[in-house]
Image (spheres, rainbow, N blue to C red):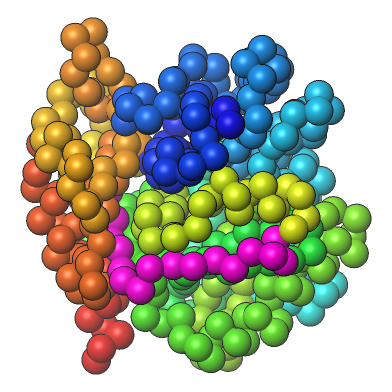
Amino acid sequence: MKVLIVGSGGREHAIAWKVSQSKKVDKIYCAPGNAGISELAECVAIGAMEIDKLVAFAKEKAIDLTIIGMDDPLVAGIVDAFEAEGLRVFGPRKNAAILEGSKAFSKDLMKKYNIPTAAYEVFTEADKAIEYLESKAEFPIVLKADGLALGKGVLICEDLAQAKEGVAQIMTDKKFGSAGNKMVIESFMTGREVSVLSFVDGNTIRIMTSAQDHKRAKDGDQGLNTGGMGTFSPSPFYTKEVDEFCKKYIYQATVDAMKAEGREFKGIIFFGLMLTPNGPKVLEYNARFGDPEAQVVIPRMKNDIVEVMEACIDGTLNHVELEFEDNAAVCVVLASDGYPVAYEKGKVISGLERFKDTDNYYVFHAGTKLGENGEVLTNGGRVLGVVAKGTSLKQARLNAYSASTWIEFENKYMRHDIGKAIDEAEE
Ligand code: GLY
């Protein structure tokens, strides 16, 4: 098979690595890819949102399967465009990707189908939102821009002044662009966050192993929200009871709700869960692998990922059982100092060769590019995800932090408390 992967981050590198293990695959392309992905795939200079060019490329190269890693092209309808040309593609169609593309849609869906989530209201006018905040809100409160906003469109506001400022940013100043044409105001939930990824074929859902992300830039969950500074898998908080509850009230219920709405979902559903004192609730849905959740979940997966994706497309996922290794993995993101605000690029990265042929250690590139002489350069805020497995979460964490010292580049920055929750789980 010839496979095309669309995207350029650590998630797409992890997908490319797993696809390269498939016995069904002879050739991998990635658009646009990065320096790390170029070791596994032929990278082509087409952006993930250049949908017409991607379709033309897939036709020209007779691609057998295209895998969409990123949210923006999914929400824009890339799957529909591929299918219209008779091309096989893994991911939800536009009418199903709305599960991630509109927070108002997903909240209304959960309300209609009794899927546990926080209480909320939807607003299309800033003054109506302010009126609501002044009369009915309890603080802290959560404001969400309706559309995609690079994971940054969620604001937790401690008081009325902050909330008014948040409404102005989202709806008046359009800090997140058209994503802020509508907004959701939601009750603040307390508890532990867990990410659960799943494969879905429209009817059947298969749950992957759990993971936990670290969204804030600084140790102790301080600083600004980022795309994710590190992950671990599995989550010790995702107990058998939690799993049973979610299977009964959340996972299949979501797939069935989408089908009932005429929005059959095929692809990945990422359940962002909050384990509240009143039971698990859905914080958000995403319509693709999490980043950097993929980097700790995919290396632990035993199945051939191409076979599972084909089963999703063909509607035969009921014949597939997912298997994960009985171990743990931790990902520490190496970023450029200053991320997520302002940072320098173009710094030479050394130490990458240490990961070659070292079992159970991986370096997934997030923001890198090749220099003129073949050297690998930093090219983004999040630069690399250093991943290590271990027989336990603690061992995996030790291994990942040890491997993070193998890599050097100017202005290297990382959090030092990825997986701190592992210790808390034991207390
Ligand atoms: N790690 C969170 C996300 O991928 O949205």
What residue occupies the far top of the structure in this picture?
Answer: 372
- Residue 402 picture quarter: bottom left
In reply to whether residue 272 is colored magenta, the answer given is no
Is residue 40 positioned above or below 253 on the image? Answer: above
- Residue 384 picture quarter: top left
Q: Which stretch did the figure color magenta?
A: 317-334
Q: Could you tell me which residue is drawn at 19 percent across and 39 percent down?
A: 356
Q: In terms of depth relative to the viewer, which is nearer, 412 or 180?
A: 412
Q: In terms of depth relative to the viewer, which is nearer, 4 or 415?
A: 4
Can residue 265 be seen? no
- Residue 219 picture quarter: bottom left
Q: Could you tell me which residue is drawn at 30 percent across and 63 percent down?
A: 329
In reply to whether residue 322 is colored magenta, the answer given is yes
In the rendered view of the protein, which quadrant contains the C terminus? bottom left
* Image location (x, y in percent) of residue 373: 19, 9
* Image location (x, y in percent) of residue 271: 59, 65
